[in-house]
Image (tube, coloured by chain):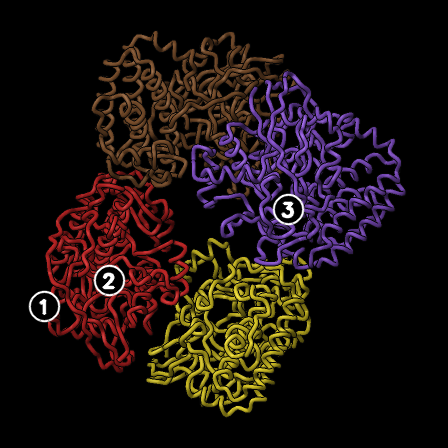
Chain colours: A brown, B red, C yellow, D purple
Amino acid sequence: MIVPAAARRFSGLPAGDLAQRYARIRLYSLTLAAPLSAEDCQVQSMPDASPTKWHLAHITWFFETFILERHEADFRAFDPAFRVLFNSYYQGVGEQYPRPQRGLITRPTLDEVKRYRADVDGRMQTLLANRSDDTAIAELVTLGLHHEQQHQELLLTDVKHALSFNPSRAAYARRWPMTSVRPQPLCWFGYAGGLIEHGHDAELDGAFCFDNETPRHRAYTAPFELASRPVTYGEYLAFIDDAGYRRPELWLSMGWDWVRQGRREAPLYWHRDGEGWRNHTLQGLVEIDPRTPVCHLSYFEADAYARWAGARLPTEVEWEHAARHLRATPGAAQRGNFADSGAFHPLPAGDAAADEPLQMFGDVWEWTQSSYAAYPGYRPLPGAVGEYNGKFMCNQYVLRGGSCATPAGHVRASYRNFFPADAQWQFSGLRLARDL
Amino acid sequence: MIVPAAARRFSGLPAGDLAQRYARIRLYSLTLAAPLSAEDCQVQSMPDASPTKWHLAHITWFFETFILERHEADFRAFDPAFRVLFNSYYQGVGEQYPRPQRGLITRPTLDEVKRYRADVDGRMQTLLANRSDDTAIAELVTLGLHHEQQHQELLLTDVKHALSFNPSRAAYARRWPMTSVRPQPLCWFGYAGGLIEHGHDAELDGAFCFDNETPRHRAYTAPFELASRPVTYGEYLAFIDDAGYRRPELWLSMGWDWVRQGRREAPLYWHRDGEGWRNHTLQGLVEIDPRTPVCHLSYFEADAYARWAGARLPTEVEWEHAARHLRATPGAAQRGNFADSGAFHPLPAGDAAADEPLQMFGDVWEWTQSSYAAYPGYRPLPGAVGEYNGKFMCNQYVLRGGSCATPAGHVRASYRNFFPADAQWQFSGLRLARDL
Amino acid sequence: MIVPAAARRFSGLPAGDLAQRYARIRLYSLTLAAPLSAEDCQVQSMPDASPTKWHLAHITWFFETFILERHEADFRAFDPAFRVLFNSYYQGVGEQYPRPQRGLITRPTLDEVKRYRADVDGRMQTLLANRSDDTAIAELVTLGLHHEQQHQELLLTDVKHALSFNPSRAAYARRWPMTSVRPQPLCWFGYAGGLIEHGHDAELDGAFCFDNETPRHRAYTAPFELASRPVTYGEYLAFIDDAGYRRPELWLSMGWDWVRQGRREAPLYWHRDGEGWRNHTLQGLVEIDPRTPVCHLSYFEADAYARWAGARLPTEVEWEHAARHLRATPGAAQRGNFADSGAFHPLPAGDAAADEPLQMFGDVWEWTQSSYAAYPGYRPLPGAVGEYNGKFMCNQYVLRGGSCATPAGHVRASYRNFFPADAQWQFSGLRLARDL
Amino acid sequence: MIVPAAARRFSGLPAGDLAQRYARIRLYSLTLAAPLSAEDCQVQSMPDASPTKWHLAHITWFFETFILERHEADFRAFDPAFRVLFNSYYQGVGEQYPRPQRGLITRPTLDEVKRYRADVDGRMQTLLANRSDDTAIAELVTLGLHHEQQHQELLLTDVKHALSFNPSRAAYARRWPMTSVRPQPLCWFGYAGGLIEHGHDAELDGAFCFDNETPRHRAYTAPFELASRPVTYGEYLAFIDDAGYRRPELWLSMGWDWVRQGRREAPLYWHRDGEGWRNHTLQGLVEIDPRTPVCHLSYFEADAYARWAGARLPTEVEWEHAARHLRATPGAAQRGNFADSGAFHPLPAGDAAADEPLQMFGDVWEWTQSSYAAYPGYRPLPGAVGEYNGKFMCNQYVLRGGSCATPAGHVRASYRNFFPADAQWQFSGLRLARDL
């Protein structure tokens, strides 16, 4: 959530910039949905995923409910039924339509949801023009846009999951230029650790952050070292070939149960195909490229791989510390292989010699060993928007750095993503760490 | 399935008639889908139901797989992937796409499925023109058209179920003229029974039948009487008001478990609304009309109601015997309130005095007490089409007479429909019987 | 339930006989439990089964609740908590302890339950002595003793199931003399059928019957023939070896799902052991004897075997008709391989030439194709004892003839046992039938 | 696991002491089982719990498998089947009997398991006498005895759970002297925090520890304060009466789902009884005593209560830090209300003024907010015994301090217990913490 320092900063922001930013980010959601048919946008392939149409409506609902309803003169709901239909989990706003049934909402249609978006966007622009000096509105709009970007990533990962049930013709888009590079050798970078500052810093990370990144606080870490790049498909294949999925000693107890009950022998979206493996991607079924960061790993798989490799997952304190000290690529959080590259798949690191960790941002979310928990002194915002992060702090693990499905500009060094240990449908990989 | 007598009759049928019949019945499927959006046609609201799009594709697949593939010169599949994708349960044809995931097939789109239909229809018309004297083809086409009519009814009941998950705007169509009539009093008609002939008779029932209606055979029944009309909403409401859903002695043991586990207190689609009950129909939410035959009952509910009323469900032998001896309305199986009335809901019987059972055909399927089983001497057809009926003869109960969602001309006195005891989403009601 | 004719007969029965019969049958329950430890008597291996201790208590509860409570002067419950604890499913008596948790009732202990039995038995003998002329009591006692015999069989089948979870030392008793006989060749016996009388007849079947065997009524059956003996292990092995569990065309649709979901490739209690099969029995793990009637088949397996063999299951009308017309062995229902033989396993037929069906009674229950349903004119008894049979008439199939676990003297030609189609833990086999 | 320093210390320990300690702790397991019948010892009331008989066998198996099998000359298994039957989860030792079916192992009987214990104990005493100078054996024996003590506590909590299914006569023992005391008022004690040492210290905590308490390492904590005693029944009742179970804003999202799905409105073992609440305890059903520490809370309930109270759960660093600095009761870990008090229930704190936290040890395990994770630099032991702790480090939360069911002398300040967030059947309560 927005820290006071950030709030002050907003008041100095030219009003026009926010309106433009609103227009640009809102448009990008439609751009992402453009390659999809009404049918593609309708389906929900598991309770954890949502239909594209629902995403498009819900992120609009956020602006209508938390901003227009409170700040628009003569507010009138576009459709009163939407208040329940597109509420995700905000108990403070009232009832929610049951999550596992989101795919059964056929009415409104996709076209009607687009009209809903257009209507709310028009009213939002009017509000932004009339109330350009209202800090509270600016803060909520900023929050809403970051919320929208999160759903843009979920839209992509949910579509990928849904398309995987189409036995043929399962591509979302074909625009990924497969470039041929030599593999990046793995090396390690050391960190002295000590008592360090952890959490969001407006100077370093930009004004905005979610409430779970605060407050900035002290934490201690022993010396450690971090791998120069994420684990690749080629390396993970060696783990599989070394009977990785058949050796209980490599797995957490829950992980081993998960392997056996699911009869798993490879990550999600891998298909054995004659002599080799093929991979369901947003560009359809492709050969596995051994140099590419491996993704769609559960926490269990990431943990087992690290144990097999004689290493471990980093803590989130270690990861953030390293990400803050990138020298050669200080703007890594702004560049890298994000959704705007159009690949929608991790890309190889390239073979240029590295003098610091590569691919810390973009490509794949990196599992840390850290359970998702409140920072010391954490306080959620009052009211329904305060339900955003804190109430999920149980049985989830933190991922860092963003992925090839994250909108550019959305992440930062202090950004905390989190998923349950068995979740696989995000672009989740890992980077190894070791004690020094 | 087609009995030999029927087969001979086909050879005398003018070829043009069959082609016209083909065109008319195939078109009716599209007519039924016309009020629905691509989204409406996509969803599957429970494993027992299928998406409209899937129905439209599957019934086309039937013609392509069982007729064109065998009889068309230079046959080439419209799309080879469809062979698995739209196979319902025919093991003899090979693999099937998992039934509970039919709603996840977003590709092909509805438009592509319509192109698939147009393509197959064109080729079928060519085949029918060139091979007009081929009895085997005529028989298969006839079977395919009856199969299509069955799916037309399922399409309507599945859509009704799917739309019920839309909290608002859940109407399929609005064309049902609510007519005001006085209630039809209940009276009883007696039958002497004895050793009678049971099962399909080409003279009485028309040439075509499914294999499960054969062979015609002898059966014995004691004297019995049958109610003059189905049980109405008004009567069923009295059962509810008399604590029908709270008295275990009225229910089968399995039925009582079903009531408690589902916390049921009324049939499917009833919603308590302030002081009264409202009913989800294909025309949206409506008041309950006490004179109308009650529907969407499970076998458990029909059985419990009958016990409460001091009566019982008829056997299928009794029902068919009575249906054969309608004097005043010998063509009842051709008229009555079928899908072509456009009501898509049962209608009141009217208040004219009855001198024989009314509404035996159309309005609601009537549960019998008979377990669905093979007639003595029953033989399924050889080959994959023989998988049509016989393999479902377990834990299902027979319903008779057709409903307001059955295409006109589809049923006959010997027609046997069947569903599990807990199925509610068909237009299923009951007519009381008693020993004499 | 007791038909009026039977009731009249009881009044002529010397009182001492009933008291002796009571003592003998009650003692046999304890005899059956004697080889078991307190631990063996405690466990419940699936919701459908009950602990031995529970059986012993419940059948005592029946006498206490339905007889002593109504007829004993100054009745006082042995322990008021037992009224709920040991009520199986009689809604009319009040609440029941949840069935799947019967194995968690550790208190009372087995010893206390035996004291409960002794207490009730003493009071029952007093009642029987004092009220020897009371027909109503005599009828209820007779019902209670037949009820106890049913639980004696269940006790054995439930213990067999429970012991199968002990990886070693799983024998109940060792007293089965394996005799070496040559196989009985299979031959067929024909029946003309026609309009016949069906159901209990006091002259032919003895005075007592359960209500579901009544009323005697007319039924029609076409000519048929019946196999000379049940299907054997050897024959069933040929079905397995002919890929019987891998060919969907042999199975009902529900049966095929059952095979695949359970990954089944043989009946219950078969264990592949190196080159051959071994069989868990009440005498421990034994070699399969190919001449012995095969048992522990589900209805699905019996039905699939019959289809594979080019035959079918008999109807219950056919079976009863044949059982009534045994010429050479008119007392078959009284002799045969019942529980008192101590084998607790079916035995080979022997190789003597047969001139009528062998092993109609005892050895294995024989699945019929008949769904368990009310006979025309069936009326359950009033009151809680009327919950005995009728409320289970749904999704069950009738078995006939008794088994090697049935107490001798318990069955008759009109006796109807019934289980769901997937039940395997009874001694259930099959006899083939064919149309003539 | 045993740290090197500890290992060295063992070599100086007189051999007789270990043998005596072995005898004493092993006997206590039998003492705990003494009030139970064979039936009580047989049952398993949920997959997470184990039968008493199984506990008694498994902890014997530990000594037989990890010590005798390796160190006894001419080792011969007591019963080779036990190797699989009583292996809990050690993959390194081979197969395990399925955990949810432990309650179905009726053979061996309880008496046979006791013979198994006697046999192993005799051989162990011989080994300890002959190899009194073998450090490796001494270490393993020490580990085995601590392992046995853990199962002693589980035995009590599992028995409590199992007995709760007996509607009457559910007491384990009656020896709890209810003393009347005035309530202890709640006050707070502050701690400065800073960079502190965390984890096992042989000087402070004694030589032995489990591997998950190591290595000792530095951790930083901000200033905090801790409540003077655990939350009581009376305080928790106020939370219930303030609609605590009906207000989603007080709960974690997973916790709220858990409340609704389980229709929960109070902790485990609370029964509403007319106007008040009663509590199932090991001494039977008792009145709730408002001054007693509340127990059988899930993590969800502890977390929700703390939020309602305007406080939070402590971290495990905070808890251990406070436990180390008890001035008035430095031996608290050795005294307090442990299992040997015979109460088997938490006791009130008394009303004497406190100048430091009371009841840190014994009475109830205290939930911390800390996810159970590896300490920096943690290394599990090599071999099968290394499967002891590390592989469970996922989706569990740490509890500290021991309970009224913990054997005296078993816990220490560094001791880490852990359970999933929904676990309730341990004696788990909470102590509030706040930021300073």
Tell whether label 1 touches label 3 (CB within 8 Å). Answer: no
Distance between mark 3 and mark 2 Cα atoms: 56 Å
* Side of B396 where D18 appears, left or right: right
User: Could you tell me if residue C403 is visible in this image?
Assistant: no
Rendered residue at 61%/19% (across/down): D221
The chain under label 2 reads B
Distance between mark 2 and mark 1 Cα atoms: 22 Å
Q: Residue under label 1, please give it.
A: B352
Question: For the residue marked with disc 3, what is the amino acid?
Answer: Thr
Tell me if mark 1 has few (under 14), some (14-19) or many (20+) residues whose alpha carbon lies within 10 angstroms of its own.
few
Q: Nearer the viewer, residue D135 or C110?
A: C110
Label 1, secondary structure: give it. loop
Q: Residue under label 3, please give it.
A: D157
Question: For the residue marked with disc 2, what is the amino acid?
Answer: Trp
Q: Disc 2 or disc 1, which is closer to the eye?
A: 1
State the mark number for residue B365: 2
> Where in the figure is residue A279, as x and y percent of width and height?
44, 32
Rendered residue at 45%/11% (across/down): A202
Count of numbered labels shown in the rendering: 3
* Side of A189 where B182 appears, left or right: left
